[in-house]
Image (cartoon, rainbow, N blue to C red):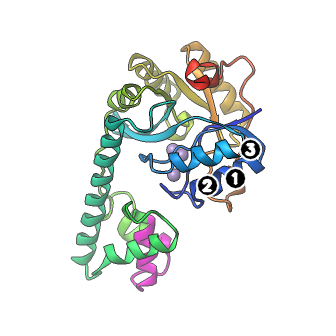
C-alpha cells in the first residue's frame, strides 16, 4: 500500500482543489491519504468525502507553522477532530496574523511609490484559484510587482523588496513549538515533525530539536519527504528509532508541474522504522 501523508490543496498554497487532489492521489495508487494544508483545515471535508468515494483510507491532517529557537518549523498533525473549536480558533488567529502582514507589506510598498499592492496581489492570488479568504503571500506580491512594471521579474522583486532583510520581510508570529504540538493533541491528534532535513540544522542541533520535540509529546518525525536522497532517509530513520518516534512519509505535493514532488512518489521508509499508521489513531 502507498501511504502519502503530506500534500497541499488550494486551501493553502497548492494548485488543485481538495477533490481534484484526492482524484489524482487515487490515480497514483495511493491507499492511505492525508491532506495537510498550511495552518488551514478548510479543505478537509471535501477531501474526506472524495477520498471515501474513491475507496482510499483518509485521516485528518494539517501542517502547522511553529517557532523554535528563532527558526520557523513545520509540524504535521494527524488524526485530530477537524471540528475542534480549539484548533479552528488557532487557525483563525494565524490567518488574521497573515492578513496583518499582507497589509503591512502593502503599506510599506505604498510608501515607496508602489500603491495598491494589496489589491494587486489579491487579484493575482484569485486568478491562481486560491481561496479568497486566505491572504496573499510574498510570491503574489512579487508577481504583482512584475505586472505593475515595478520590477523586471520575480527574482528582482525578492532581491530588492521582498527577500530576507528587505522591506517586505515581515516576521510572522507563530506559536512556539510546544504550543503547536499541544494544539494538535488538544484536538485529539498526534504531532509529527515535518521534513527535519529542510531546516539546514547541524546534526547536533537536529538531535536537540528531536529531544525537545519528544519532551513536548511530539509522536513522530517525517522520515521520508518526497524523493529524498536515500542517505538522508537512512539517517533520519536511525534517529527516529533512537528517539522512539513513529515514522511518517509524504510527497509534499503542491503543483502537478513539479515532477520531483509527485503524489505517491517517495523514497521507501526504512524497513526497521515503525510507521505512524500503526498507531490506533489511524484505525478509528
Ligand atoms: Mn507550501
Ligand atoms: Mn513544510
Ligand atoms: Mn508541506
SS under mark 3: loop
Q: Look at the magenta stretch and give its main secondary structure.
A: helix
| Callout 2 crowding tier (Cα within 10 Å): few <14, some 14–19, many ≥20 | some
Which residue matches tag 3? Answer: 265
64 to 46, vertically: above or below: above
Residue at image position (41%, 38%) is 83
What numbered label is drawn on residue 72? none
Please give the range of residues in magenta.
Answer: 139-155
Q: Nearer the viewer, mark 3 or mark 1?
A: 1
Identify which residue, 280 or 168, lies in the foreground.
280
Identify which residue, 91 or 246, lies in the foreground.
91
SS under mark 1: helix
From where the camera sits, is residue 262 visible? no
Marks 3/2: CA–CA distance: 19 Å
Asked if the beta carbon under badge 2 is closer than 8 A to the nearest atom of ligand 3, the reply is no
Where residue 192 appears, x then y in whole percent?
51, 29
80 to 64, vertically: above or below: above
Give the mark count: 3
Residue placed furthest toward the bottom: 149
Residue at image position (28%, 74%) is 109
Where residue 62 appears, x then y in whole percent?
48, 40
Residue at image position (55%, 37%) is 195
Which residue matches tag 1? Answer: 23
Which residue matches tag 2? Answer: 19
Marks 2/1: CA–CA distance: 6 Å
Amino acid at each position: 500500500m502507498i501511504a502519502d501523508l503530506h500534500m497541499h490543496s488550494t486551501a493553502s498554497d497548492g494548485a488543485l482543489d481538495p477533490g481534484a487532489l484526492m482524484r489524482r492521489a487515487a490515480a497514483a495508487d495511493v491507499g492511505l491519504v492525508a491532506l495537510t494544508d498550511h495552518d488551514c483545515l478548510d479543505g478537509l471535508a471535501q477531501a474526506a468525502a472524495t477520498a471515501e468515494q474513491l475507496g482510499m483510507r483518509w485521516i485528518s491532517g494539517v501542517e502547522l507553522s511553529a517557532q523554535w529557537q528563532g527558526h520557523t518549523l513545520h509540524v504535521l498533525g494527524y488524526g485530530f477532530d477537524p471540528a475542534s473549536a480549539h484548533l479552528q480558533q488557532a487557525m483563525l488567529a494565524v490567518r488574521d496574523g497573515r492578513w496583518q502582514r499582507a497589509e503591512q507589506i502593502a503599506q510599506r510598498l505604498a510608501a515607496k511609490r508602489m500603491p495598491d499592492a494589496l489589491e494587486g496581489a489579491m487579484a493575482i492570488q484569485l486568478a491562481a484559484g486560491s481561496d479568497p479568504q486566505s491572504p496573499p503571500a510574498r510570491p503574489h506580491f512579487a508577481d504583482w510587482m512584475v505586472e505593475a512594471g515595478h520590477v523586471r521579474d520575480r527574482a528582482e522583486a525578492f532581491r530588492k523588496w521582498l527577500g530576507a532583510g528587505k522591506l517586505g520581510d515581515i516576521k510572522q508570529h507563530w506559536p512556539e513549538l510546544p504550543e503547536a504540538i499541544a494544539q494538535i493533541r488538544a484536538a485529539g491528534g498526534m504531532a509529527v515533525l515535518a521534513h527535519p532535513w529542510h531546516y539546514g540544522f547541524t546534526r547536533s542541533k537536529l538531535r536537540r530539536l528531536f529531544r525537545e520535540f519528544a519532551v513536548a509529546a511530539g509522536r513522530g518525525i517525517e522520515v521520508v519527504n518526497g524523493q529524498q536522497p536515500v542517505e538522508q532517509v537512512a539517517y533520519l530513520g536511525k534517529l527516529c528509532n533512537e528517539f522512539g518516534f513513529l515514522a511518517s512519509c509524504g510527497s509534499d505535493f503542491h503543483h502537478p508541474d513539479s515532477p520531483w514532488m509527485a503524489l505517491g512518489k517517495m523514497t521507501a521508509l526504512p524497513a526497521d522504522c515503525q510507521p505512524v499508521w500503526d498507531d490506533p489513531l489511524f484505525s478509528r
